Image (tube, rainbow, N blue to C red):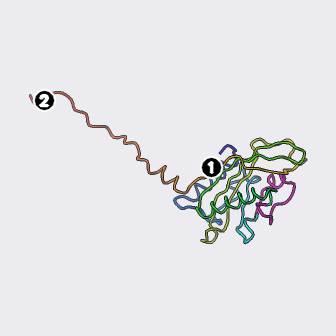
Amino acid sequence: MKNPSTRLVFDYWDTLRGERSAPERGEIEPGALRHALADTFVLENEPIGPVFRLAGTRLCALFGRELRGRALVALWPDVEAQGDIRRLVQTVMDETAGAVAGLSAQTQNGATVHLELLLLPLRYRGRTHARILGALSPTLSPEWLGLDTLDSMRMISLRMIWPDARALRKAEPPEDKRPKLMLLPGGRV
């Protein structure tokens, strides 16, 4: 994860989940994410696919419109890319795994911007496959923000964050700091 917003959202989510595969939606406190809130969103799993339930102001400014109530896949004009995003979101929900994707985007005026997408599973009232916490932020804040909008995006990298990764980190035995047994030459007198 390269972007500060992405790292902040992931660290907060990871702390909330503890030993569970995903935290409850009700545990999310917006104030704890205040420095990344403009880049943060919550998706709701609907029959048509993932739909924005909430979307940050900077995220909406990147696309030049309010995203609440819109389908996530509608941000990709290419039908093949829409299928990839649908499968990615389904994997995040099925496996309760996180995903970090690098995106390359073009604005309507032809400027290129690199973005980082984070998708993290949430439970809602005990149900899995219900919600996703995410962040979408530019690597560098574009000077055109508010004057131009994103027209197309494509995924250029993807990394999954599997739920057992935390267990593997904890499974490493701690370093033993007790003094070791040392034999000294000598004997009985």
Q: Is residue 157 above or below residue 45?
A: above
Nearest the viewer among 89 and 52 is 89
Residue at x 62%, y 65% (from the top left corner): 24
The residue lying furthest to the front in this view is 80
Task: Identify the residue position indicated by label 2 in the image.
Answer: 187
Nearest the viewer among 82 and 130 is 82
Location of the N terminus by quadrant is: top right
Kindly state the secondary structure of the residue where label 1 is placed. strand
- Chain part drawn in magenta: 52-73
Q: Position of residue 129 (x, y in %)?
A: 64, 68
Q: Is residue 106 magenta?
A: no
Quarter location, residue 3: top right
Marks 1 and 2, Cα distance to the nearest angstrom?
61 Å
Mark 1 crowdedness (10 Å alpha carbons): few <14, some 14-19, many ≥20 = few
Residue at x 66%, y 61% (from the top left corner): 28
Task: Identify the residue position indicated by label 1 in the image.
Answer: 159
Nearest the viewer among 66 and 129 is 129
Residue at x 80%, y 63% (from the top left corner): 68
Q: Which dot, 1 or 2, sits closer to the camera?
A: 1
Q: Is residue 102 left or right of residue 144?
A: left
Quarter location, residue 77: bottom right
Mark 2 crowdedness (10 Å alpha carbons): few <14, some 14-19, many ≥20 = few
Kindly state the secondary structure of the residue where label 2 is placed. loop
The amino acid pointed to by label 2 is Gly
Q: Position of residue 131 (x, y in %)?
A: 67, 65
Q: Is residue 66 magenta?
A: yes
